[in-house]
Structure formats: structure tokens, C-alpha cells
Amino acid sequence: MEIVDVNEKVGFAPEFMPRILRVKPEYKVPLICMEPGQEIPPHQSGTGVFYFMSGKGIMTVNGKEVEVGPGKMIFIEKGESRGIRAIERLTAFAVHMSADH
């Protein structure tokens, strides 16, 4: 077992870089801390779950824009394109699964 205080891991930088909370062969958990205007360009990847903790942003999934904010959870299937653009200072975490269960 490992306990992580996500709030202690939050940090912002002039250039966005995810902070990896945990990584195993079957999954990866990045913490996403973005300043307004920072962006993760749309890209394809494996199955993912995104949970937004604070701030506001736009998540683009397969070309469709969805407003995201505190308490929103987005499930994305393997192969679906996804990207995030921060409108306000944004924090979220994701669980990327490398194998579909």
C-alpha cells in the first residue's frame, strides 16, 4: 500500500510538465497542474480516467470540447483523442491504463 497526499504534490511551472504520482507496467498516474493558457495538445493514448480537482478548463475528446472543473470525471477509451487547455489554474489527476480490463 502507498498513500499519497495529492495536495502536497501540487505545483505549477512556466512550462507544463505532469508530475508522475505512481507508475507500474499496467498503469500510470500523472498529476496535472496547469496555468491558464497551458495546454496538452490532443493526442491518442490508452484508456484513461481524468478527475478534475480545481480550476476550469476545456477538454477536447475526439474533436468535441467539454468544459471541465472541480468534481468532473471524464472516462476516455483507448484510441480516443484527448487534450486539455487550462482556462483558470487547473489541477487534475489521471489514471492511464496500458491494458484494458
Image (spheres, helix red, strand yellow):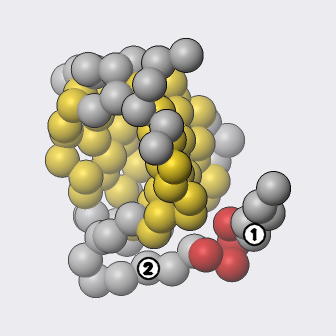
Residue at image mark 1? 5
- Where is residue 60? Give x, y as percent: 29, 33
Q: Is residue 84 left or right of residue 19?
A: left
Report the amino acid beneath label 1: Asp
Q: Is residue 76 visible?
A: no
Could you tell whether 54 is left or right of 100 in the image? right
Dot 1 or dot 2, earlier in sequence: 1
> Eyeballing the image, is 89 above or below 100?
below
Residue, far bottom? 14
Q: Is residue 70 above or below residue 87?
A: above
In depth, the one of 28 and 77 nearer the eye is 28
Mark 1 secondary-structure assignment: loop
Which residue is at the front of the view, 92 or 89? 92
Which of 91 and 56 lies nearest the eye of the viewer?
91
Return the residue nearer the eye: 82 or 70.
82
Q: Which residue is mark 2?
A: 12
Image x and y of residue 55, in percent: 54, 58
Residue sitting at x 79%, y 63%: 3
Q: How busy is the neighbourhood of tag 1: few (under 14 within 10 Å), some, or many (20 plus)?
A: few
Query: Label 2 is placed on what type of residue?
Result: Phe
How many numbered tags mark residues here?
A: 2
Q: Residue at x 51, y 80 (%)?
A: 11
Q: In the image, is residue 93 above or below residue 62?
A: below
Q: Position of residue 61 (x, y in %)?
A: 30, 26
